[in-house]
Image (cartoon, rainbow, N blue to C red):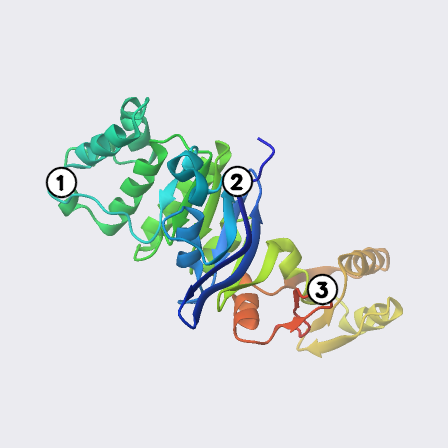
Amino acid sequence: MSEPPVLCEGLAKHYGDLAAVAGVDLRIETGDVYGYLGPNGAGKTTSMRMMLGLIHPTGGRALLFGRDPQREGKHALAGVAGFVEAPRFYPYLTGRTNLEMLAAFDGGDARARIGEVLDLVELTDRAGDKVGGYSHGMRQRLGIAGALLRNPRLLMLDEPTTGLDPAGIRDMKVLVRRLSAEGITVLLSSHQMAEVEELCNRVGIIQRGRILYEGTIRELLSQVSTGYRLRTTDIAATLRMAGDHGIDTTVDGEEAAFSASEDAVAALSIDLGRSGIGIRSLEREGATLEQLFFRLTEGEGAASPDGRPQLVQEVA
């Protein structure tokens, strides 16, 4: 379909004088693994609830594949699945029985998919156990299994790794990659910056109910100067040649530290080799998504003429 999986235009939710969401504009394209980021209370969960039609917006709209859940109800959720906050199950029933109940609500071929989704989230061996005995990570995976019963084209996951141990986080990342490889668009709300940087191609950063940044992670990282550390067999000659290329360097022990474009670094490297100067190490030091997230959400980003935040200071 030509319509994007998610399109929000001026989406707002007010509780009296409190603006929980104050005009969110975002667009998630087919095939995205989209990281939805923001501090606690920024409006992530409220906006996701409005996207799914669980609460009514006080302004704007959210469309799923071009359909408005507020106008079309459950029909707008065709091809959409997921959970907001933690998934809920009957603890005294087995994992399989919980899925059978969900499949009965969905109808169609959902029941026939139970074995497939249990295998996909690696819960087949525990499907006959009561959910009350599941670990937190197992319940999260069972929640994804329940969502996958609908054979969705869009999967919305709110903090799926919260409370997981390192092994659980690893398994969840493997699962998200597998689902993305199968063509499912994923909206992933998370506080785990390293996880988002590793999994997602695009991000939306929300603060106080407004989107501060939306775009690719590459574009966001490129707004900050990239530093390099270079160690060679002749540091004095290296400094002279760097100057010839218009690169300002500082000496840190046996290394030259500088900021430059990739093309300038490539040209310097070629000239060093031609001059018989060996490169012992060349390390790139860029900002992480976590550093840029704090810069944006804690007020250190400056707005550009088009209203988009610009990170104008170099990250140490």
Residue at 81% x, 70% y is 247
Structural distance between the alpha carbons of marks 2 and 3:
26 Å
Q: Amino acid at mark 2?
A: Pro
Residue found at the far left of this picture: 92
Choose mark 1 or mark 2, whichever is in front: 2
23 vs 95: above or below:
below
Query: Left or right: where does residue 42 sit relative to residue 114?
Result: right
Q: Please give the label number shown on residue 130.
A: 1
Q: Which residue is mark 3?
A: 306
Q: Which residue is mark 2?
A: 5
- Residue 173 placement (x, y as % from top left): 42, 46
Q: Amino acid at mark 3?
A: Asp
- Residue 114 placement (x, y as % from top left): 28, 28
64 vs 183: above or below:
below
- Residue 122 placement (x, y as % from top left): 30, 35
- Residue 301 placement (x, y as % from top left): 62, 72
Query: Left or right: where does residue 266 sit relative to residue 174?
Result: right
Of the image marks 3 and 1, the number of the one nearer the N terminus? 1
Task: Kindly state the secondary structure of the residue where label 3 is placed.
Answer: loop
Figure quadrant of the C terminus: bottom right
* Structural crowding at the residue carrying mark 3, measured as other residues with C-alpha within 10 Å and reported as few (<14), some (14–19) or many (≥20): few
Residue 238 visible in the snapshot: yes
Choose mark 3 or mark 1, whichever is in front: 3
Task: Kindly state the secondary structure of the residue where label 1 is placed.
Answer: loop
Residue 109: quarter of image: top left
Residue at 43% x, 73% y is 17
Q: Amino acid at mark 1?
A: Lys
